[in-house]
Amino acid sequence: MGKILVATFNEDEDLVLDRVISVLGKDCLIESHPAAVLYFEHELEIHPQHHRVLIARKEVALSHHEYGILYFLARHPGWVFSKEQIFEEVWHLESDSCFSAVANTMSRLRKKIEPNPQFPIYIQTVPGHGYKFCPQSSNNNK
């Protein structure tokens, strides 16, 4: 009897997927499903497959790290992450001196996506702890 393996890979893990396919051989069926588009209130859309962010159907140009922070936080709405956790996830480095890198990137990101960066609606600061993504998702399968 055949077995089914369901695995999720992000873009950084493509090499792992290629290795798994080579080990399994040609007798296995591989189905690939693109990452779902994330839709949130206030007309925010994140398209992981294309690294695109839209607000009110207008594309917002984000740097690699700005996009990384937004996508990481948006995948975990309501979770609070420290600057160290965000740095390690997005920069893929140890967090020796990450405070200014995360804070500066977060400031630029908020200027690009928040209607009023002084009163953010997407990414909230949790004093003494870090940041969290706040809006409710409206429909992740639009």
Image (cartoon, rainbow, N blue to C red):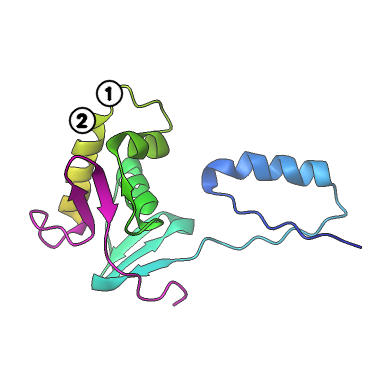
Q: Residue furthest top?
A: 96
Q: Secondary structure at mark 1?
A: loop
Q: Secondary structure at mark 2?
A: helix
Q: Which residue is mark 1?
A: 97
Say which quarter of the image contains residue 107: top left
Q: Residue furthest right?
A: 1
Q: In x, y percent, where is residue 58?
A: 27, 67
Q: In x, y percent, where is residue 38?
A: 40, 66
Give the residue at x 32% y 33%.
84
Where 82 sits versus 53, above or below?
A: above
Span highlighted in magenta in the image: 113-142
Can the viewer see residue 104 in this picture?
yes
Give the residue at x 29% y 49%.
62
Q: How many marks?
A: 2
Query: Residue 133: within the magenta?
Result: yes
Query: Residue 98: within the magenta?
Result: no
**Amino acid type, mark 1:** Ser
Residues at badges 1 and 2 in contact (C-beta under 8 Å)?
Answer: yes
Q: Which residue is mark 2?
A: 100
